[in-house]
Amino acid sequence: FVLLADATFFGSLLFGYAYLWTAAPGWPPPRLMAGSLIEPALGLIGAGLAVAGARSAGKQLARDGEGHSGLAGAGLALLFGTLLATALLRAPAPTAHAYHAVIAVMIGYALFHVGIALLIQIFVHRRGRAGYLSARRSAEQRIACLWTDYAAASGIVVLLATHLPGLIA
């Protein structure tokens, strides 16, 4: 239920972003964030690797009793690095305009959730290496897969929502 509440909050954040974009005076802001195709592409690669790695580890655990692939962690690390680079290199100062503040909150939200998913994947990987995972004890792997899916999806949505307006304008 935690991820359902998180998804509701994230949907509200995206709704606020879209509402300000369409209804607030002074929008679009005088300076949009400089968009790029590189960060969304790298984020998409990282998210794809994370989701594929988490799902393959779950299938391997159900089949062999061993499921601790590091691919999901590597994909999440790439997505985290891409979001961090966007925050540090491209995002404008959040105090200049409400648009910039919303961008900062969305990137922070995605960084937080991708970071949690990465920590969960590291935990599950270490538990698997220590022999604590099996086909009968697979709840941790399933939870890690769920968090990885959510973090990958929210990270991609944030990268697209922050980069596309600058590319279109």
Image (cartoon, rainbow, N blue to C red):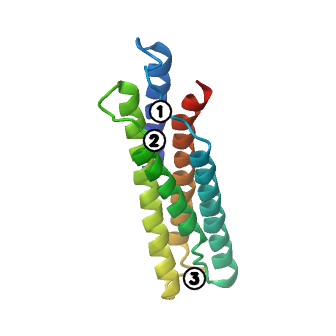
Nearest the eye: 50 or 139: 50
Instruction: Provide the residue designation for mark 2.
Output: 90
Q: Nearer the viewer, residue 135 or 72?
A: 72
- Estimate how packed mark 1 is, as few (under 14), some (14 to 19) or many (20 or more) residues with alpha carbons within 10 Å: many
Q: Is residue 97 left or right of residue 148?
A: left
Q: In this figure, which residue is indicated by the disc labeled 1? A: 33
* Neighbourhood count class around disc 3 (C-alpha, 10 Å): few under 14, some 14–19, many 20 upward: some
Residue depicted at x 32% and y 27%: 96
User: Residue at position x 58%, y 52% from top?
Assistant: 43
Q: Which residue is mark 3?
A: 134
Query: Neighbour class for label 2 at 10 Å: few (<14), some, many (≥20)?
Result: some
At label 1, the amino acid type is Met
Residue 7 visible, this orientation: yes
Name the amino acid, label 2: Arg
**Earlier along the polypeptide chain: callout 2 or callout 1?**
1
Q: Earlier in the sequence, mark 3 or mark 2?
A: 2
- Asked where in the image residue 68 lies, by quadrant, the reply is bottom right
Q: Are marks 3 and 1 in contact (CB under 8 Å)?
A: no
- Vertical arrangement, residue 72 with respect to residue 99, above or below: below
